[in-house]
Image: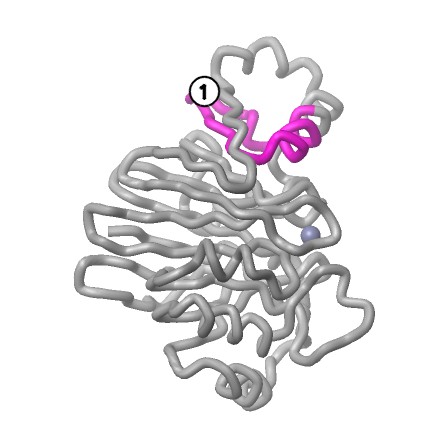
Amino acid sequence: MVEITFLGVGSATPAISGDHVALLVRAGTLKALVDAGPTVMAQLGRQGVTADDIDVLLVTHAHGDHVLGWPMLLFRQRPLVVVAAPETQRVLRELAWLVYPELQEPMADRLTFVDLGPGGEWRVGPLRVRSAATCHSAASQAYRFDCEEVGRALTYSGDTGPCDEVAGLAQGCDLLIHEATYLHVQEPMYGHSTAGQAAQIAAAAGCGALALVHRDREQPEALDLYEAEVRAYYNGLWWLPYAGQTVILSAAGLNILEGR
Ligand SMILES: [Zn+2]
């Protein structure tokens, strides 16, 4: 079973303060954090999770709304594995040792950096992790997590415009968590997607369900407009997750829980 908690679902300038997109992925005893924006410690705290509870941090790219909270994970006693593409790793290290140079030495034997670039594969706990380059304004990658024990898979796009590589990575996934920064095409889009474009990727990849994140919309959101855009391309289950919501992938299928 894999549990995915949406720690935040917003863009770089989210409609709700502190709602930057981040995921907590739990499988067996493993707790993996995907992206760590400026408010990630508060987002984790609301789930009763501390820095020391996180085993693995996976980072899609080095934009501030995805990495500025990561140095706070260094206040820990347990080991941490940091997974990202090499160019993103460089930024993560520079950022950490710029703001906490005194932690570099004590953390030396607790931090492991895993270079996992586009096309890479890595295994941790019950998860097989794969990555693919996305179409963004900075070097960025999507992640796919396969839990072979239950025969389920999810893909998280990170930031991207409509991208064949993301569709390829997400082939046959039970759940695609795709960014939908916009509701309709705006210029310039800086390598982001609309809800309709995310729906096209979900359809092309044959995904069982679609969750739209990195949303840049005012609150409350116009569900009928999303419905019209998504349904033009995609017939599967789709929804707008909110911060604190959890979805479970198990042998029985996908179960969306009420959040807190
Ligand atoms: Zn970005």
Q: Residue 245 in magenta? A: no
Q: Is residue 3 left or right of residue 136?
A: left
Q: Is residue 43 visible?
A: yes
- Secondary structure type for disc 1: loop
Q: In the rendered view, would you say 20 is above or below 88?
A: below
Residue 112 percent coordinates (x, y): 49, 21
Q: In the rendered view, would you say 60 is above or below 207?
A: above
The residue pinned by badge 1 equals 77
Q: In the rendered view, would you say 108 is above or below 154?
A: above
- What residue appears at the point 50 percent right and 82 percent down from the top-left corner? 233
Please state which amino acid type lies under the numbered disc 1. Answer: Gln
**Start-end of magenta stretch:** 72-93
> In the image shown, does 155 or 168 lie closer to the viewer?
168
- What residue appears at the point 32 percent right and 41 percent down from the top-left corner? 127
Q: Residue 87 in magenta? A: yes
Q: Quadrant of the C terminus?
A: bottom left
Residue 257 percent coordinates (x, y): 32, 67
- What residue appears at the point 22 percent right and 54 percent down from the top-left corner? 151
Residue 21 percent coordinates (x, y): 57, 56
> In the image shown, does 47 or 64 lie closer to the viewer?
64
